[in-house]
């Protein structure tokens, strides 16, 4: 039996499995719907007697954007033509390492230290497994900015400025314990993680390495989703508000249009031919 031929279907199976886990087990879907509807008690700690769920609707949107749109979107994008989109897996790995680095120093009060360490180990095992099963593993260590786009670089700089300012403010709130449960359950820390991941996504997409179009469109969708959520819950703690929501929605649409425009321009892109050297 040719193990190389088995690599793609096995990788696809695990990519789909982990995508479902992000949506269901890690509540990317149920928390992501919090700005509009409540399904059970998404995001609630075991002792939810003092958990103000109605004040966590924007935090649900942050969780939904991170787990439900960015991470799940990257995995869904790898279900087809995975060999041609290594940038999606590179972002997935980088995003989850950011997740661990963000939550370890700001562990939610309802999460025991041992459980946080176990979760971190599980995430690392998942990342190692996905990289080991990837159909062209050597491509994961290939990175170049030779085909980068000035327009996409400019959008990445704008994203870094805006999301960096939001992330810095929410980091200050996390350190200050602002918002009660928002701080004790590390919700501001999660917002910082989301800000960093959105910056990473736009920077990686600007390189136009293989998979950049899919990553760019996923990033665009994340901004549109967050914008609509902010418009829906403008008065929630941490929400971008009505004006910010409109700006994020418009910005996401413009960025998505820029990705489509750039994809039609001639450019140098790393080729992923079916060469044994790439497998």
Image (spheres, rainbow, N blue to C red):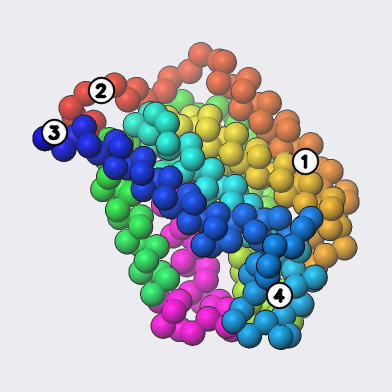
Label 3 close to label 1 by CB (< 8 Å): no
Corner quadrant of residue 223: top right
**Was residue 98 drawn as part of the magenta stretch in this picture?**
yes
Residue of label 3: 2
- Nearer the observer: mark 3 or 1; the answer is 3
- Quarter holding the N terminus is top left
Residue of label 4: 182
Which residue is depicted at the point 32% across and 61% down? 125
Q: Secondary structure at mark 3?
A: loop
Mark 3–mark 2 Cα distance, whole angstroms, equals: 15 Å
Is 50 placed above or below 194 here? Answer: below
Tally the numbered discs. Answer: 4
Mark 2–mark 1 Cα distance, whole angstroms, equals: 39 Å
Locate residue 143, reporting x and y percent. 37, 37
- Nearer the observer: mark 3 or 2; the answer is 3
Badge 2 local density, few (<14 within 10 Å), some, or many (20+)? Answer: few
Which of the two labelled residues, at mark 2 and mark 1, occupies the earlier sequence position?
Answer: 1
Locate residue 186, reporting x and y percent. 62, 74
**Was residue 240 drawn as part of the magenta stretch in this picture?**
no
Which residue is depicted at the point 68% across and 77% down? 183
Residue 138 visible in the shown view: no
Residue of label 1: 249
Locate residue 265, reporting x and y percent. 56, 15
Question: Which stretch appears magenta?
Answer: 91-117
């Amino acid at each position: 039996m040719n193990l190389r031929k088995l690599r793609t279907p096995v990788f696809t199976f695990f990519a789909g499995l982990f995508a479902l886990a992000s949506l269901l087990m890690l509540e990317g879907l149920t928390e992501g719907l919090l700005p509009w509807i409540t399904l059970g008690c998404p995001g609630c700690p075991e002792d939810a007697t003092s958990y103000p769920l109605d004040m966590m609707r924007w935090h649900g949107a942050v969780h939904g954007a991170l787990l439900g749109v960015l991470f799940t979107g990257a995995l869904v994008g790898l279900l087809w033509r995975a060999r041609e989109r290594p940038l999606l897996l590179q972002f997935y790995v980088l995003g989850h390492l950011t997740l661990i680095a963000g939550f370890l120093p700001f562990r939610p009060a309802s999460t025991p230290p041992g459980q946080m360490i176990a979760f971190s180990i599980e995430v690392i095992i998942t990342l190692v497994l996905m990289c080991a099963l990837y159909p062209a593993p050597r491509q994961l260590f290939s990175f170049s900015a030779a085909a980068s786009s000035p327009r996409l670089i400019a959008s990445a700089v704008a994203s870094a400025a805006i999301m960096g300012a939001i992330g810095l403010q929410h980091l200050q709130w996390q350190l200050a314990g602002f918002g009660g449960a928002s701080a004790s359950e590390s919700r501001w820390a999660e917002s910082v993680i989301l800000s960093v991941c959105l910056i990473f996504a736009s920077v990686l997409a600007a390189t136009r390495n293989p998979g950049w179009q899919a990553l760019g469109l996923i990033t665009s969708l994340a901004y549109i989703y967050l914008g609509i959520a902010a418009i829906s819950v403008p008065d929630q703690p941490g929400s971008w508000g009505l004006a910010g929501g409109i700006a994020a929605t418009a910005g996401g649409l413009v960025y998505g249009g820029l990705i489509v425009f750039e994809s039609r321009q001639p450019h140098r892109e790393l080729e992923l031919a079916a060469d044994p050297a790439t497998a």
